[in-house]
Image (cartoon, rainbow, N blue to C red):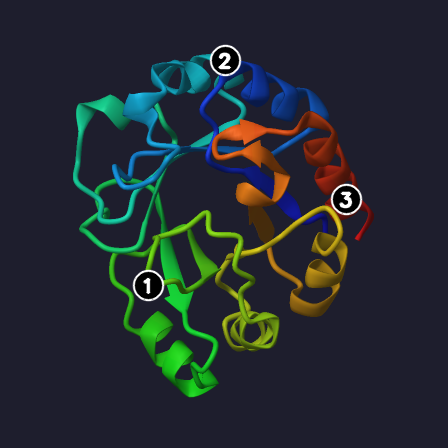
Amino acid sequence: MVTRVKICGLTRLEDAEKALELGADAFGVIFEPSSPRFALDHLEALNIPALVGPYGTTVAVYGEYNASPVDLDFGLVQCIAGDAAARPHVRVFRFPASTAPDAAFQAIDEVQGNPKAILIDSYSPDALGGTGHRADWALAAAIVSRFPSRKAVLAGGLTPDNVGEAIRQVRPYAVDVSSGIESSPGIKDHAMMRDFIQAARQA
């Protein structure tokens, strides 16, 4: 199975265009105001769906989802909380390193709204994502094994150097990267993006 790649935290059309050229599968734009990658501070990001076109997956990324006309051009919503059942969506789970597998399984069992995928991320008390903190790969692998019919996306601390090993250990449906391919928040390093996508494909 080929592992899909989502490039998240895009703020510039030139970075989205490069991601498209390199073969990324999904393109994430942040709608969480606390993020330095907040789309309404980087308005050209709102044009990414038009750039990507109808055959690429664009994702509007929230902390708590609140329906807004500004994200209607995006194919998916991604959120930690909020009622996204009316939209195709990805539900985010941020598990602290000490989380027992049974507790994680229960949280996923209880999710409402029939998400298209579940995203497994690291937990930080200071930010909702894009921190560069690595998720617990052993826990993520246990979740993938426990829920074979769920499409599990692995995020959190992925880089070109570790994404291959992450895929081999976890076997996720997709991987999601933001800060691990940046020269500064919201500014993607094109060489790192290329290396990340190549490493994910080779894994």
Q: Which residue is mark 2?
A: 51
- Which of 109 and 202 lies nearest the eye of the viewer? 202
The percent position of residue 143, horizontal first and vertical second, equals: 51, 73
Where does label 3 land, which residue? 201
Circle 1: residue type: Pro
Q: Residue type at mark 2?
A: Leu
Quick one: label 2, few (<14), some, or many (20+) residues within 10 Å? some
Classify residue 58 as left or right of residue 108: right
* Depicted 7 relative to depicted 54: above or below: below
Q: Tell me what residue is drawn at x 33 percent, y 31 percent.
A: 38
Q: Is residue 72 visible?
A: no
Identified at 28% across, 23% down, the residue is 40
Of helix, strand and loop, which one carries label 3?
Answer: helix
Disc 3 or disc 1, which is closer to the eye? 1
Q: Residues within 10 Å of mark 1 (few under 14, many from 20)?
A: few
Instruction: Locate residue 141 relative to residue 47 in the image: left or right.
Output: right
Instruction: Decide if residue 75 is in sight here.
Output: yes
Q: Amino acid at mark 3?
A: Arg
Residue 28 pos. (x, y %): 45, 34
Q: CA distance from mark 3 to mark 1?
A: 32 Å
| Residue density around tag 3, few if under 14, some if 14–19, many if 20 or more, within 10 Å | some
Which badge, 3 or 1, is on the more N-terminal residue? 1
Dot 2: what SS? helix
Q: Badge 1 is on which residue?
A: 125
Q: Relative to 28, is 54 above or below?
A: above
